[in-house]
Amino acid sequence: MILLTHDSYSVYRDYYTVLPCRFSVLHNGIDVSKFYKVTPEQKLILKNDLGLEHKKVFIWCSKDLLKKGLDFILPIWKKIHQKHQNTVLLVVGATRNIQIEGVQFLGKVSNNELPKYYQVSDCYLFPTLWHEGFGLSLIEALHSGCYCIASNLGGVPEVLQYGKLGKLIENPHFEHEWEEAIEIFLNQKEHNLISIPENLYTTESWNLGMNKIIDNAKNRF
């Protein structure tokens, strides 16, 4: 059985009293030739092009499902924006026709256009309310240079290396924990730049991992 995270294996191991099979873990991978961090100068150009100059840009990107947390995070964002008028939340993937101050609903965005919205953003919000298997958008945002604030659920902690690569919300169903994390991010004059290995969560590393799994399976017969 091939799983996305070691934490998933732990769930299987602890739930089933009989588990007579082999396991492997293979993280998802993305195309880092598309999702990559731009220079501060390029980021400023992107912000100017999109009319977001002098803004702290946050982004949410997902299918508009209740479990993905958009309806949960929007009331929190209203409070944040009232105190920080220089903020904006970009919402990608939700085709809603509503007006909320400090929120831009971008609808569905093509795969070719998506990277620039991560690259222009300063912080990625991942308020999932269910046990995610992995979270592709999370690693897209990471490689694009976003600081990530995410729910401590499912495979998310392992993806963020248990807080090393971003902020994990221990109790993601409590609004005040999100408010506090966002406020801390906004009030920091300088943000510690999180560097991730170039081959972490890439399609290249996924291919290598899959080939190794296939070779090991062949060698058993």
Image (spheres, rainbow, N blue to C red):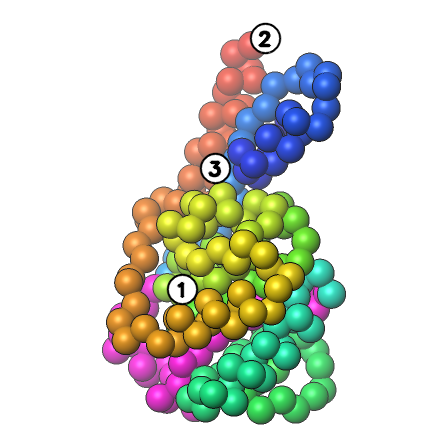
Q: Please say whether residue 106 is visible from this viewpoint.
A: no
Which quarter of the image is occupied by the N terminus?
top right
Which comes before the other along the chain, label 1 or label 2? 1
Is residue 54 located in the magenta-colored stretch of the structure? yes
Q: How crowded is mark 2: few (under 14 residues within 10 Å), some or many (20 or more)?
A: few
Question: Is residue 19 found inside the magenta-colored segment of the image?
Answer: no
| 219 or 72: nearer the viewer | 72
| Magenta residues (range) | 37-65
Which residue carries the number 1 mark? 147
Three-letter code for the amino acid on which mark 3 is drawn: Asn
Residue 22 position by quadrant: top right
In percent of width and height, residue 117 lies at: 47, 74
Near-viewer residue (92 or 148): 148
Mark nearer the N terminus (1 vs 3): 1
Along the horizontal axis of the image, is 30 left or right of 109?
A: left
Q: From this view, report whether residue 45 is shown above or below residue 113.
A: below
Q: Residue at horizontal 31%, vertical 81%?
A: 44
Q: How many residues crowd around disc 3 within 10 Å: few (fewer than 14), some, or many (20 or more)? A: some
Label 2 amino acid?
Phe
Q: In which quarter of the image is residue 19?
A: top right
Name the residue that disc number 2 marks.
Answer: 221
Nearest to N terminus: mark 3 or mark 2 = 3
Which residue is painted at 42% across and 39% down in the image? Answer: 205
From the image, which quarter does the C terminus lie in?
top right
From the viewer's side, name the closer residue of 173 and 106: 173
Residue drawn at (35%, 88%) of the image = 54
Q: Nearer the viewer, residue 74 or 61?
A: 74
Between the C-alphas of marks 3 and 2, the distance is 22 Å
What residue sits right under mark 3 in the picture?
207
Residue at the far top in the pictured view: 221
Mark 2: which secondary structure?
Answer: loop
